[in-house]
Image (spheres, coloured by chain):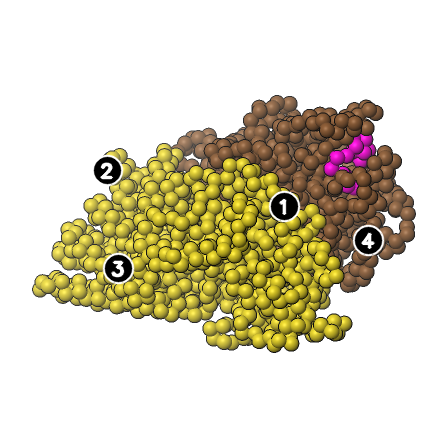
Chain colours: A brown, B yellow
Amino acid sequence: MANVAKKVSWSGRDRDDDEDGRAGETTPLLNGTGPGAAGGVRQLTPSSFLRIGQLSNVDLNEDIHELTELPRQRPNEIPHNEKLLSLKYESLDYDNSENQLFLEEERRINHAAFRTVEIKRWVICAMIGILTGLVACFIDIVVENLAGLKYRVVKDNIDKFTAKGGLSFSLLLWATLNASVVMVGSVIVAFIEPVAAGSGIPQIKCYLNGVKIPHVVRLKTLVIKVCGVILSVVGGLAVGKEGPMIHSGAVIAAGISQGRSTSLKRDFKIFEYFRRDTEKRDFVSAGAAAGVSAAFGAPVGGVLFSLEEGASFWNQFLTWRIFFASMISTFTLNSVLSVYHGNAWDLSSPGLINFGRFDSEKMGYTIQEIPIFIFMGVVGGILGALFNALNYWLTMFRIRYIHRPCLQVVEAMLVAAVTATVGFVMIYCSRDCQPIQGSSVAYPLQLFCADGEYNSMATAFFNTPEKSVVNLFHDPPGSYNPMTLGMFTLMYFFLACWTYGLTVSAGVFIPSLLIGAAWGRLFGISLSYLTKGSIWADPGKYALMGAAAQLGGIVRMTLSLTVIMMEATGNVTYGFPIMLVLMTAKIVGDYFVEGLYDMHIQLQSVPFLHWEAPVTSHSLTAREVMSTPVTCLRRIERVGTVVDILSDTSSNHNGFPVVESNPDTTQVAGLRGLILRSQLIVLLKHKVFVERANLSLVQRRLKLKDFRDAYPRFPPIQSIHVSQDERECMIDLSEFMNPSPYTVPQEASLPRVFKLFRALGLRHLVVVDNRNEVVGMVTRKDLARYRLGKEGLEELSLAQT
Amino acid sequence: MANVAKKVSWSGRDRDDDEDGRAGETTPLLNGTGPGAAGGVRQLTPSSFLRIGQLSNVDLNEDIHELTELPRQRPNEIPHNEKLLSLKYESLDYDNSENQLFLEEERRINHAAFRTVEIKRWVICAMIGILTGLVACFIDIVVENLAGLKYRVVKDNIDKFTAKGGLSFSLLLWATLNASVVMVGSVIVAFIEPVAAGSGIPQIKCYLNGVKIPHVVRLKTLVIKVCGVILSVVGGLAVGKEGPMIHSGAVIAAGISQGRSTSLKRDFKIFEYFRRDTEKRDFVSAGAAAGVSAAFGAPVGGVLFSLEEGASFWNQFLTWRIFFASMISTFTLNSVLSVYHGNAWDLSSPGLINFGRFDSEKMGYTIQEIPIFIFMGVVGGILGALFNALNYWLTMFRIRYIHRPCLQVVEAMLVAAVTATVGFVMIYCSRDCQPIQGSSVAYPLQLFCADGEYNSMATAFFNTPEKSVVNLFHDPPGSYNPMTLGMFTLMYFFLACWTYGLTVSAGVFIPSLLIGAAWGRLFGISLSYLTKGSIWADPGKYALMGAAAQLGGIVRMTLSLTVIMMEATGNVTYGFPIMLVLMTAKIVGDYFVEGLYDMHIQLQSVPFLHWEAPVTSHSLTAREVMSTPVTCLRRIERVGTVVDILSDTSSNHNGFPVVESNPDTTQVAGLRGLILRSQLIVLLKHKVFVERANLSLVQRRLKLKDFRDAYPRFPPIQSIHVSQDERECMIDLSEFMNPSPYTVPQEASLPRVFKLFRALGLRHLVVVDNRNEVVGMVTRKDLARYRLGKEGLEELSLAQT
């Protein structure tokens, strides 16, 4: 694979020797008072800096050019590469900017008012739960009806043509129906909102990690997602409707908590207190948890999912609220579906998918079976790794060649048609007839079977995947022919692998479970043959373990997935074996390739921060990691300088250290605060400045509301007109900057910097020297660059993809 | 209640005005070179400082005297007070001191070695799980046999005397047996290891929070704890053996992870890498989780307990290890107990207590019941608050009057005798006879019942509390007379309340569950009467909800307790109602008084850090919160000065900022690092210093191992002899200090400081001014002082209790 990234294997502290030389470099780069000074202050991208560190007299500007032109050289070939970090992603700011305005507001609020805020938080969480549950109900009911309609039409057609021959018409009907439904689903995603593609779990992981993915929590995305999921499932793709619930819950949470919608252009003027990244993130965690909870009837699993995939600082109160939202969500779904199914009071549908009751007395496990389960975990890990590796190559192919929306739609239609064809051929060729046993099969296809019998392959293919999973878990021993299961596993494996990453909204949970359940059941049947039908070798139990192993091998979650599986089976007996299976699958899978979600995050070159810094990164210090030189502002700054800095496209900074503003001395003074690009934009927009001659005049006061109203989509600097006279005015930043930004000394090791950055959810971390003077800035990209590769510490390149 | 604490209600920023004056104060307080300078550098306790802030010309030393003498004035009356923070508790250091030695070691370790460390961590967690499970088995088996023996002896005696009269002999026998067993249990706790008293949960909470409770994780404590629990339960007290498992697991974890035991004076020379607070804490979390897991068969609940009660920074890998330890623990217990009970392969005893199988088909709930459950939550909250309030007054009484070990033993014996007497009288007076229905009653007492019948009150009193709970959950409707249940609830409530806080090892979980199950069942029976015996009003279900409500009202856990209850019932159907009940109980209970564990932590005046700073504390800044003046060391310091500082009893500091050591100028220079008392002690012990005349000589090198060998019990300064000549030597701290301590500027608000401190588990946080000069230090006590009281922000006093 062609690879533009430069691997650096750190062999020690060989770059420590220029300590004093570096510290001095920032001095001339602070903005002077003249407008011309702005040219020299752009931030260099770290990888160009690293080269400067080695060859100290290279021209900086050339270096920048070389770097920014890199992607342009091979624009169509490898715009994405897992050894790159994209510069296009901005970060979210999970640290409150505690400026004077903020503190004044907080101080004004008394204890009773805080209680009101707290109550509002709980109300929002309840609303998130209710709405997420309702959305899940909507999806479920619509899918059930549409899919039922489709299967009935096709079944009638097949039944008709089975008698008189010409089943190819049935195939054509089935394939055409699927392809056209999927076409609609794919068109809305590809042309209206591409971010709604896939399960949305990688995107939500990134969001909770602190990366801003454009449009990811918009109402429009939700609408497209919901319609897309319905159409994908009805279109017969090898997908599930569960994964997208997590994304849906997150969008609902983001929408409700902000009390307004950009897509609808409505502002309800409520919940204005929560209009900042920190609060919004907390609610989005709750939404994601509510989504899991509605999807699997797993409220605790939902909480753990949010924490395992998203959280950094664990807060008890927040966790309770998340739990509350999750519980409300599954309860709402349960109530509505129970009413819909006509048994209003019995609350028997806690989630979109319900694995059915595993009777633990009949299906308990014994100690001897544990090695068997571990072996299944190994198989799951290997198959999962194979799935991910195939999907990796497929995704690379897609990124290179299938990036036009039309092509994406065509591919989706192709997959839909192929899925129907494969299913049809498999059913057609299968001679596995089983007696109809009441209600366990929704659409029994008789085909060439005798009267009173149905085609067993059709239970698996001619059905929504959720139903097939439950059938595999619970059908009595003997319902499936081993040959049928084997063929089904093989076919479905490739179909599911091909399907994941299509431009449709769809989840990978259910297909994974289905593949695993199929080979797990096959495994159970073989075991039963080998042990001459021992009572303990119930194939349904092995189907469950296989499903866990396969899903674990693909997504590599452990704690949350264990709990989700436990809750979905409604039974804690299998907790220990499921944990063993999932852990084994994860360890084995990780040996080959990483989890599907992480893989896709990396393929998108997202600067994702993992839980800890790479273990061998103690040899790096903040001095080597930081971006430098850094653009600083003075406390009382000329408006023109601010505009120039913000307009400078080559340095797309979002935070600027504010330093002492004594114009009389050339001495550089210490750090005084930190101000964000968004704050400066609001200040410029509201013309918060005074003429230079009248510095004693008080500049216009702003309220926190002015900042909140602009959140989260601050206008670009180009849209703000500043006249030549205004450029000469002065702007006093003291009131708006955060006077106490977190700082680290230059000597701090990378793990130390990482821990501070990650634990507090920072966006900018100022590096200072012994005199509290700014020497650099650490941002998310500076930390995400370092990664533990096969040969030790690797450094990723940054690129404008 | 007499109260020496001073309440300060912060009305604004009225103390902000002395900004520049304060910053200068530290200048003269840096250590001079002469030995006399040491006298002026002691740290003032914050509350004296606060007065200095108001009256700036008070003599500092007088102020200290007044403060330290406060407890001496009323030594026997109120040594404890919930408005005080004790100075006797030290903190743990959950932030690695990244000095040169540490970094060199980390840099030497390559990727493969890190993998070995990681594998060791997993091995340790497995061992923690196995040992915790085995300890739980041991307790269970011994209790079962001893208690069985006791009940058989008493039963035979009662049966004998029922016929021929003279049952008072039986009472005497029973009471004497109980009192003598409890006496032994109480004596070992009171005289050998007082920290083993109670459930140990508050202590473990404190430990995980970062407070060092002496002896809490020693092997001796474990032995006393295990024996104590066995004796308390066998002695018939209203206690459970589940709570102490958490403490036991924590001790096991601390012991194994350090690879040595102080009690045994053995060092196995393994796991030396883990000999620091950070690593030890992680393992202790795993041990606590394994304890919960073994106690309730609740591995997920265990993980959540550790996180809800202990963790701050959530780390995915750590969580997986904790989960692994939990799973291994319940699995070990399950295997061993299954073998012990003779059904080796069926794994039917996941925990010490098992709530029995709730058949969800028969006992599902419907939507109409939800208001009923919420009402039960309210009742549980009120009863829990009553329990806590009574226990509060009792504890205050005990602290004042029952502080001699002999008295404590006598009280424990008294409670044991009273418990037996109450039980006997209740059984004697009860005329509630029930037919013997097979095995559900372990020791059916016939007493005055007809043949083939047993006394129903005896099921509740004449039994270990675990069995009584399960009976209340599962006995068929009609097994209990409402009168019996009512009397039992009332009596057991007061007995349990009296028992908690005795000098015995015992838990409060099971008594709480039992009280709740009793009134819950009573409630269910009443409901069944009211609704004319509707099918849904199964009293067992209401017993479960009552148990949850009562326990929730007392301990106020929600998420972890919900999961524990779910896992203990082996069934997720009741998740939603249990959550509702627990949340309601918590909200209602919190309205009156706080949770039992938090109450006891506060009664011990522990500087416990909650999850967030008080909501109204934005008006405080680091400048007002910090301790000042702070004792600083220079980078190259005179040995005599170091010794004097460490010996200075009035300032019992544990961390000292290191500042620039230019002896030629009087100018104060910036912060260079932070060094701990323990590190200085090791340096002095190993005589790591050079003569003043030969500063160019290289001082002796130490290895990290020298520090690890001394951990965690560093010798006191008094035990280190430093000669007069050595006092004049110089010591270079550069290599040993942490060169990049976390700092905050003076302007940072209290919530900001709190967040940094709590999220990173700090012990010392240096407050610096704009020039990076040290102006103060924030420690745990400075933050724990502020609390949200009824009338706004309160400030606790610090006292030497």
Residue behind mark 2: B529
Name the chain letter of the residue that bears numbered label 2: B
Residue B312's disc number = none
* Magenta stretch in the rendered image: A631-647
At 46% across and 50% down in the image, what residue appears? B797
Q: Disc 2 marks which amino acid?
A: Tyr
In the rendered structure, the answer to whether residue B575 lies left or right of residue A19 reads: left
Q: Position of residue A246 (x, y in %)?
A: 58, 39
3 vs 1, front mark: 1
Please provide percent x and percent y for residue A273: 57, 32
As drawn, is A536 to the left or to the right of B157? Answer: right
Residue type at numbered disc 1: Gly
Q: What is the distance, in whole Å, between disc 3 and disc 1 at their CAs? A: 60 Å
Q: CA distance from mark 4 to mark 3?
A: 73 Å
Of residues A56 and B533, the one drawn nearer to the viewer in this rendering: A56
Residue, disc 1: B21
Q: CA distance from mark 4 to mark 1?
A: 34 Å
- Where is A662 relative to B659, above or below? above
Give neighbour class at mark 1: few <14, some 14-19, many 20+ (Cα, 10 Å): few
